[in-house]
Amino acid sequence: MPQFTSPRPLQLNLRKPRNPFVAPALKRQAGRHQSAQDAHALRQQSRLDMRRLVRERFPDDSP
């Protein structure tokens, strides 16, 4: 007994997102992050500032 089947499309259009928030999210680009050199310089400057504050607060009177 033959059974009727509808013809399948030759090309499936899968580019349409189901969620309306997907398309803007795919087009979004991340901002520029801090480079490694900038982070290193910031840590070094913070370390030097902390060392200077400690020296001012607790002077070294050793001979």
Image (spheres, rainbow, N blue to C red):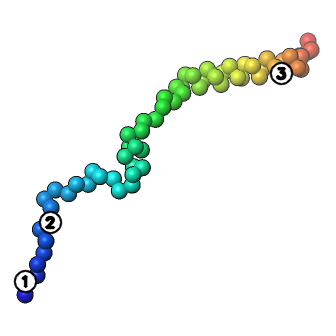
Q: Earlier in the sequence, mark 2 or mark 3?
A: 2
Q: Residue furthest front?
A: 20
- State the SS at label 2: loop
- The foreground one among 2 and 40 is 2
Q: Which residue is mark 3?
A: 54
**Image-based side of 41 in relation to 14, left or right:** right
Which image quadrant for residue 2? bottom left
Measuring from the top left, give residue 16's x and y in whole percent: 29, 52
Residue at 77% x, 22% y is 50
Mark 1 closeness class: few <14, some 14–19, many ≥20 residues within 10 Å:
few
Residue at 77% x, 20% y is 51
- The foreground one among 27 and 53 is 27
Q: Which residue is mark 1?
A: 2
Q: Is residue 55 above or below residue 2?
A: above
Mark 3 closeness class: few <14, some 14–19, many ≥20 residues within 10 Å:
few
Q: Is residue 61 above or below residue 1?
A: above
Q: Residue furthest left?
A: 2
Q: Which residue is mark 2?
A: 8
Identify residue type, mark 1.
Pro
Q: Earlier in the sequence, mark 1 or mark 2?
A: 1
Residue at 65% x, 25% y is 43
**Image-based side of 40 in relation to 23, left or right:** right
C-beta proximity under 8 Å, tags 1 and 2: no
Identify residue type, mark 2.
Arg
Image depth: mark 2 or mark 3 in front: 2
Q: Residue furthest top?
A: 63
Mark 2 and mark 3: span between their CA atoms?
A: 77 Å
Identify residue type, mark 3.
Val
The quadrant in which the N terminus is found is bottom left
**Image-based side of 58 in relation to 35, left or right:** right
